[in-house]
Image (cartoon, grey):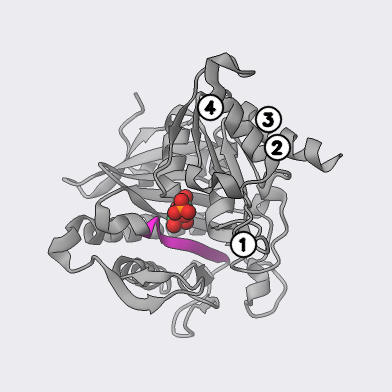
């Protein structure tokens, strides 16, 4: 049972113990957490709050925006633009970067986010979430530009998500392991409920959208076929399957009890590396998973090593229990050697 301390106390202890959590970064994380609390209030209103349904617009990805996508994006922008911790922000919902207005002091960090991941689940009351990633602005003496965001995921100063489900839970890493904080609605604050999260190296549970099977590459099909063959096949054990279609919820399950999550490249849109976005979905989740003892690749390379070329670029994702991710990655790399 973890000590029941607040997010603030946890962060201040991290600051004191490791000396690696700068004051500005701690304050930034607390602002993001407060923004997630406000998003949770809107999400939890559902039909009572006129927040369901579509906004009648499309985002930069060409996807129909839900009202809550826009609300969550605005909450994060408004909460973070005045504090003096950031130089700029980037979001799945905005084409370009958002410079902190001149009326506010500029900070040394860059914040990226998917304000409401899994929004296709909003109207059917299934868990959704906010994903965020923090980078340091390169000290180049120049004004901030989109290029400053194009850093490998290994450079992240912090990463996390907030899952809006039966509980509202903030999951965070600043490079010293992963901690989970559950929102105590009575006192209105996030309370530490798990620290030093560890993903089991093995699992019997895989997550993939099986309806895409006919579009998969051979190595993914080999891996899933072996899972489906269960104890009668080469794996010698039966597997369970889950697919929530909210990456935040699927990753939260994996951080909580293990598993492997796969959104691979497929033949539907062969010119795209995958569906998920590198900068504000795959990178933050990969850092969390690695900090919890798991692994995260694009089926061939470590995600955190990938050098981004564009702010909204997509990537294939295989993450979770280390031994399973290594198996899938090995199957892909074996194919490449033929
Ligand atoms: P599909 C949600 O739209 C998302 O970006 C991830 O959260 C989720 O894992 C995936 O897409 C679901 O995609 O194709 O199964 O609907």
In the image, which is nearer the foreground, mark 3 or mark 4? Answer: 4
The image shows residue 168, relative to residue 254, as above or below, that is below
- Label 3 vs label 1, nearer the camera: 1
Q: Compute the Cα span from label 2 to label 4.
A: 18 Å
Which SS class for mark 1? loop
Residue sitting at 73 percent across and 45 percent down? Answer: 301
Q: Which residue is mark 4?
A: 228
| Dot placed on the residue nearer the N-terminal end, 4 or 1 | 4
Q: Given the current orientation, which residue lies at the most extreme bottom position?
A: 102
Q: Which residue is mark 3?
A: 327
Distance, label 4 to label 1, CA atoms, is 26 Å
- Binning the other alpha carbons within 10 Å of mark 3 as few (below 14), some (14 to 19) or many (20 upward) gives some
Q: Which residue is mark 1?
A: 269
Give the Cα distance between marks 3 and 1: 25 Å
- Sooner in the amino-acid sequence: mark 3 or mark 1: 1
Q: Is residue 292 left or right of residue 63?
A: right
Disc 1 Cβ-to-ligand 1 distance below 8 Å: no
Looking at marks 1 and 2 on the same chain, the residue that comes earlier in the sequence is marked by 1
Label whose residue precedes the other's in the sequence (3 or 4): 4
Residue at mark 2: 329
Depth order, front residue of 152/93? 93
Q: Is residue 55 above or below residue 45?
A: below
Percent x, y of residue 220: 64, 39
Instruction: Mark 3 and mark 2 in contact? Answer it, CB < 8 Å.
Output: yes
Range shown magenta: 109-119
The residue sitting at 34% across, 23% down in the picture is 1
Outermost residue toward the right in this view: 338
- In this rendering, would 327 be left or right of 101? right
Q: Earlier in the sequence, mark 2 or mark 4?
A: 4
């Amino acid at each position: 049972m973890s000590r029941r301390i607040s997010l603030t106390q946890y962060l201040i202890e991290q600051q004191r113990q490791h000396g690696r959590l700068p004051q500005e970064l701690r304050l930034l994380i607390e602002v993001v957490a407060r923004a997630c609390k406000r998003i949770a209030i809107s999400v939890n209103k559902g039909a009572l709050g006129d927040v369901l349904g579509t906004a009648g617009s499309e985002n930069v990805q060409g996807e129909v925006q839900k009202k809550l996508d826009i609300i969550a994006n605005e909450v994060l922008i408004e909460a973070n633009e005045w504090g003096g911790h950031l130089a700029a922000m980037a979001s799945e919902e905005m084409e370009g970067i958002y410079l902190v207005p001149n009326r506010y002091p500029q900070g040394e960090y860059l914040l990226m986010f998917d304000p409401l991941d899994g929004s296709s689940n909003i109207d059917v009351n299934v868990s959704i979430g906010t994903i965020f990633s923090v980078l340091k602005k390169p000290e180049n003496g120049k004004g901030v530009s989109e290029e400053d965001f194009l850093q490998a995921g290994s450079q992240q100063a912090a990463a996390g998500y907030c899952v809006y489900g039966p509980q509202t839970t903030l999951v965070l890493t600043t490079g010293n392991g992963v901690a989970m904080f559950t929102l105590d609605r009575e006192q209105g604050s996030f309370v530490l409920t798990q620290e030093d999260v560890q993903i089991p190296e093995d699992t019997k549970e895989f997550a993939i959208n099986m309806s895409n099977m006919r579009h998969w590459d051979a190595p993914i099909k080999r891996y899933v076929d072996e899972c489906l063959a269960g104890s009668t096949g080469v794996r010698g054990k039966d597997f369970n399957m889950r697919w929530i279609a909210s990456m935040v919820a699927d990753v939260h399950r994996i951080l909580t009890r293990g598993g492997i999550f796969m959104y691979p490249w497929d033949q539907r849109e062969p010119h795209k590396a995958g569906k998920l976005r590198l900068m504000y979905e795959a990178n933050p989740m990969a850092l969390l998973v690695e900090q919890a003892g798991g692994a995260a690749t694009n089926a061939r390379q470590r995600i955190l090593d990938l050098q981004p070329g564009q702010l909204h670029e997509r990537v294939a994702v295989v993450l979770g229990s280390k031994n399973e991710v290594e198996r899938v990655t090995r199957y892909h790399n074996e194919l490449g050697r033929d």
